[in-house]
Image (tube, grey):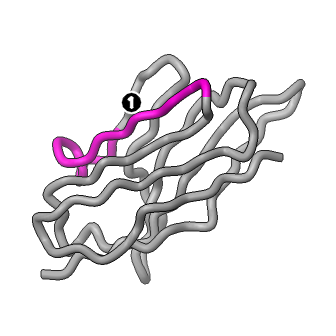
């Protein structure tokens, strides 16, 4: 199955910006949904932002207006522009892709990238 490789995490002060990127190991086929989830210590994994092949988006309530998801369908990449970061955005961010190949549905996760926002 496809593998996802994330990049772009790091340490930033509150109010700053970061950009995360994720690339699938294969291109040339359609990935239905690509996006980002996050998990903070002691909390459940939650939706950050996802985008469908057609461009529809869905954002978590806590990031609306601050984060923007985008994707390149031809390259099977997805990015997350994070602005006005807050300490509560500190988490491990995971790239996710959902796609079909033949009769089977695949739900794939990246290894995660750490984002730390200092106050």
Query: Which residue matches tag 1?
Result: 57
Q: Place residue 114 in its image quadrant.
A: bottom left
Task: Report x, y in % for residue 76.
Answer: 61, 34
Quadrant containing the C terminus is: bottom left
Task: Report x, y in % for residue 66.
Answer: 19, 48
Residue at the image point whose x is 30% and y is 77% from the top: 11
Residue 45 among magenta residues: no
Q: Residue furthest right?
A: 102
98 vs 15, left or right, is right
Residue 64 among magenta residues: yes
2 vs 60, left or right, is right
Q: Is residue 93 above or below residue 49?
A: below
Circle 1: element type: strand
Task: Report x, y in % for residue 115.
Answer: 36, 71
Number of numbered markers: 1
Task: Report x, y in % for residue 7.
Answer: 50, 61
102 or 81: nearer the viewer: 81
90 vs 50, left or right, is left
Residue at the image point whose x is 36% and y is 73% from the top: 10
Residue at the image point whose x is 24% and y is 75% from the top: 117
**Part of the protein shown in magenta:** 59-74
Q: Is residue 10 above or below residue 79?
A: below
67 vs 52, left or right, is left
Label 1 crowd (10 A; few <14 / some 14-19 / many >=20): some
Residue at the image point whose x is 16% and y is 64% from the top: 16
Q: Place residue 39 in its image quadrant.
A: bottom left
């Amino acid at each position: 199955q496809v593998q996802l490789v994330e990049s772009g995490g790091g340490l930033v002060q509150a109010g700053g910006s970061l950009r995360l990127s994720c690339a699938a190991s294969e291109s040339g086929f359609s990935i239905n949904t690509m996006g980002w989830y996050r998990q903070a210590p002691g909390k459940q994994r939650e939706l950050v932002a996802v985008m469908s092949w057609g461009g529809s988006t869905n954002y978590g309530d806590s990031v609306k207006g601050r984060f923007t998801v985008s994707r390149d369908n031809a390259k099977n990449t997805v990015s997350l522009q994070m602005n006005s970061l807050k300490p509560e955005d500190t988490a491990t961010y995971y790239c996710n892709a959902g796609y079909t190949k033949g009769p089977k549905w695949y739900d794939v996760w990246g290894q995660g990238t750490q984002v730390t926002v200092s106050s």
